[in-house]
Amino acid sequence: MRKKINLYKCYCGYTTYDYLQLLQHYTKHIEEQIEEIKKEIEEDREKGLIRRKSVKDIIKEALGLA
């Protein structure tokens, strides 16, 4: 009896026969994207494009009380 062997490929070119290794590889891509987004957010905060607000202030604005 023949065993079916799957070759898994990532969009970046990474290939493996082990599905768990592919999932770990995808996880690395996701972690890199998260770090990139965090850096962009921090840069926007430094530029003054993003201000932190309390939940109470956000609710007041939504209700038109601010």
Image (tube, grey):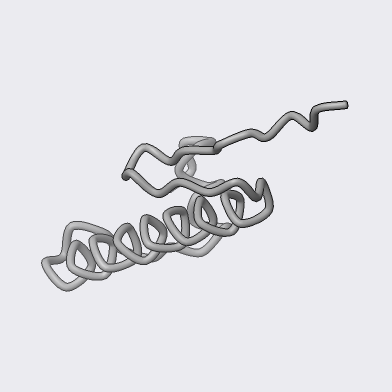
In this rendering, position of residue 54 left or right of residue 23: left
Quadrant in the picture for residue 2: top right
Q: Nearer the viewer, residue 45 or 65?
A: 45
Residue appearing at x 37%, y 66% in the figure:
35
In this rendering, position of residue 12 left or right of residue 2: left
Residue appearing at x 66%, y 46% in the figure:
19
**Looking at the rendering, in which quadrant would you find the N terminus?**
top right
Above or below, comparing residue 58 to residue 47 in the picture: above
Q: Nearer the viewer, residue 38 or 22?
A: 22
Residue appearing at x 45%, y 43% in the figure:
61
Disc count in the image? 0
Q: Find the residue positioned furthest to the front.
A: 1
x then y, percent, for residue 11: 36, 37
x then y, percent, for residue 47: 11, 67
In this rendering, position of residue 47 left or right of residue 56: left
Q: Find the residue positioned furthest to the left.
A: 47
